[in-house]
Amino acid sequence: MLIFRNTQKVSKEIGLKKGDIVDTDNEGYLGSWFCNIVTVNHRKCLIFCHSTTLYCFWVPAVKKKDFSNIIELFLKNLALNLKSEGIAEVTIENLLNEYDSPLFSKTNNRSVLGSMNDYAYLFEAYVEPLGPAGCDILAVNKKINTAPMSALKYSSGINEMKRLLMRVSI
């Protein structure tokens, strides 16, 4: 199950109603994913961040139509980013199979939101010259995920994601 924790901005863009948002502390088998919108150079960009590993990835220059297919957008970009990190395709496929039924919920962890703000500063710095639409987003996401995070005892998002995938044998 995919627990998708949206900020209010994202819920509004998606068009979720109060009844669509489930109030749960359940993190699912693999942890939940947080989602927020950050505007960089007048472009809306989505950041997705895993709650326990702090592995994140950005989707730059998102358009209105993209919000109606946010789960497909998430799954497609998750697969692309994990593949660029060298994760085996069978592992990615198994992970995506675990995310077959999405559940929308509110954000529930200020520490994760704080880490996402740190990632936003890094993202803005990395895309500064060309802007979010003109950058190599896979390379930017790779750089961001190698940053040591104090919330992870100075490990990085990609190291923690690889540990999680090995631990759950996906």
Image: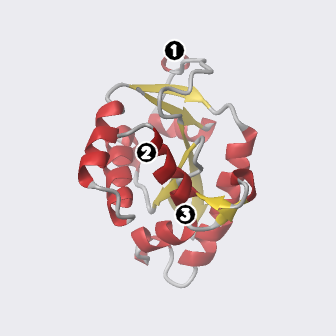
For residue 90, above or below residue 87: above
Circle 1 Cα neighbour tier, 10 Å, few/some/many (<14 / 14–19 / ≥20): few
Q: Quadrant of residue 102?
A: top left
Quadrant where the N terminus sits is top left
Closer-to-camera residue (24/42): 24
Q: Secondary structure at mark 2?
A: helix
Circle 2 Cα neighbour tier, 10 Å, few/some/many (<14 / 14–19 / ≥20): some
Q: Which mark is residue 165?
A: 2
> Can see residue 134?
yes
Q: Where's residue 77, x and y in %?
A: 36, 54
Q: Residue at x 55, y 52 (%)?
A: 160
Q: Secondary structure at mark 3?
A: helix
Q: Amino acid at mark 2?
A: Leu
Q: Where's residue 19, x and y in %?
A: 51, 14
Q: Residue at x 31, y 42 (%)?
A: 72
Q: Which mark is residue 37?
A: none
Give the Cα separation between the discs numbered 2 and 3.
16 Å
Residue receiving disc 3: 145
As drawn, the residue found furthest toward the top would be 19
Q: Amino acid at mark 3?
A: Asn
> Can see residue 45?
no
Residue receiving disc 1: 19
Quadrant where the C terminus sits is top left
Q: Nearer the viewer, mark 2 or mark 3?
A: 2
Say which label, 1 or 2, has the lower sequence index. Answer: 1
Compared across the picture, whether 29 is left or right of 91 comes to: right
